[in-house]
Amino acid sequence: MNTSGNQGRAFRAARLTVALAAALVVALAAAGPAASQERLVPESREQVLLFYAPVVARTAPAVVNIYSRKVVRSRPISPLFNDPFFRRFFGAPLPFGRPRERVQNSLGSGVILGADGIIVTNHHVIAGADEITVVLADRREFGARLVGSDERTDLAVLRVDTGGEPLPFLSVRDSDDVAVGDLVLAIGNPFGVGQTVTSGIASALARTQVGISDLNFFIQTDAAINPGNSGGALVDLSGRLIGVNTAIYSKSGGSLGIGFAVPSNMVRSVVAGLTGGGRVVRPWLGASGQAVTAEIAQSLGLDRPAGVLVNTVYPQGPASRAGLEVGDVVLEVDGRPVDDPGALSYRLATLPVGGSVELRIQRGDDEQTLRVPLMAAPEVPPRDTTTLDGRHPLAGATVANMSPALAEELGRQRFDPGVVVLDIRRGTPAARMSLRSGDRIEAVNGQPVQSVRGLGALLQRPAEGWRIGIRRGNRTLTVVVRG
């Protein structure tokens, strides 16, 4: 046995180990804070198990159950009048019988975002509620007041009065820092069984083709989300809120591994607006466009489909002032890529009014950067909301002058001037002619309609019959009603 040779090799190996360790320390010191903030992957099952429990203990007390109640009034109707033959003549609802009342209950979840009792949940959890009750994780119950609601994002803000006692709350993380594959926890009250925690990953980001709300831009997760989870928290493993669970993709009503959460950046924006001024005011770009397909990208000479092709720029709007033109392709908003109109709307909606935003665009063969002012949409012309009455087919319809501000409220990508239908009272002539909310009244008996006042004047003229021109989406309809 060559002991001295072994000792020599061991000594040289030890020196090499020390040298490598020293080099590693120097490299880490040179890398600075960025290296120390890199995400660490758990190396064993035990590390994962040890990690979840402390996170749940810290976050679960800030997630609440929400119970809402509303009284629904309805009139009893004989089954005879449900026959389509009678419906054709009488319409709906039929004014027979005394109104009956029944209580409709709704269940959901919420997240405490302030020690003073500010809670965020989904709009659909509390929509139309006459009474809202919040139950904390420790079973304490409080009556809640609705601060405000934003139907476009399906978010609502509540406040509870605890008599000055502070509540546990979650801190909010920048949702733009979330990456696909990040471990997440979903906390809520599925099916009313009680507070439940499920785990998974952020399985996709920037989902815009979901169709849940007007401002579609969701974090997708495979953490189990079920009915009752709506309004609950999606948190990272540091215990910070990254989203509010809103919907699931399901054919059976249960979780199939595809759930959607409103990103925390949008939650932060909506909460700030509703608690600050009672409503959310979003920047208006003053332009609209379409997603760049493979065919469009080829025709424009782009190397791949990306961005939003601008097809409308409104005169004197923010985009027009910044120099944006029809045919430009918007690629980024403040350095964040946008691949369709939904992503563009989201990026703008999370920014406060005032200041400006940087758009990176493609114009021909050149890339340019434009600085666009962040302005609220103007209410020009005034909406002049009016409920029509009289002896004509539009009686019972509530109409208004379309403006950029109203278009923003209605979640419309485009602003088309004219008179838009906001609501239709049931059982009225407007309901019987199948008028819909969102329809634009374009003409009456061949005369163009340009304002609510002008529409009212046209409807007052004597007529033996009526020809009503309606714009519904991309279709133009003509409804003929005989006198």
Image: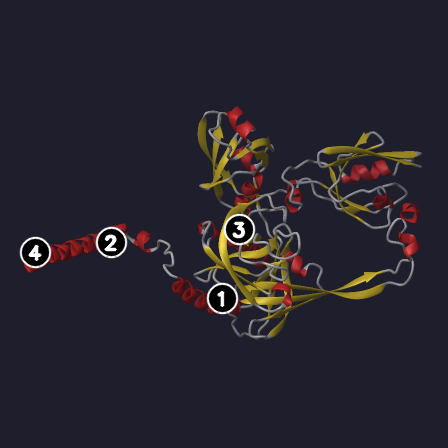
Quarter that holds the N terminus: bottom left
Give residue 80's position: percent from left, percent from top: 93, 54
Mark 1 to mark 3 CA distance (whole Å): 19 Å
Residue on which the image places disc 3: 219
Image marks 1 and 3: residues in contact by CB distance under 8 Å: no
Mark 1 to mark 2 CA distance (whole Å): 33 Å
Badge nearest the viewer, 4 or 3: 4
Residue 327 at least partly seen? no
Q: What residue type is labelled 2?
A: Ala
N-terminal of the pair, mark 1 or mark 2, is 2
Give residue 303's position: percent from left, percent from top: 46, 29
| Residue 452 quadrant | top right
Query: SS at mark 3?
Result: strand
Question: Which of these two is toward me, 9 or 120?
Answer: 9
Residue on which the image places disc 4: 5
Q: How crowded is mark 2: few (under 14 residues within 10 Å), some or many (20 or more)?
A: few
Q: What residue type is labelled 4?
A: Gly
N-terminal of the pair, mark 2 or mark 3, is 2
N-terminal of the pair, mark 1 or mark 4, is 4
Mark 4 to mark 3 CA distance (whole Å): 61 Å
Query: SS at mark 4?
Result: helix
Q: What residue type is labelled 1?
A: Thr
Q: How crowded is mark 4: few (under 14 residues within 10 Å), some or many (20 or more)?
A: few
Give residue 70's position: percent from left, percent from top: 74, 64
Q: Relative to 91, say whether 325 is above or below.
A: above
N-terminal of the pair, mark 4 or mark 3, is 4
Q: What label does residue 59 carry, if any?
A: 1
Badge nearest the viewer, 2 or 3: 3
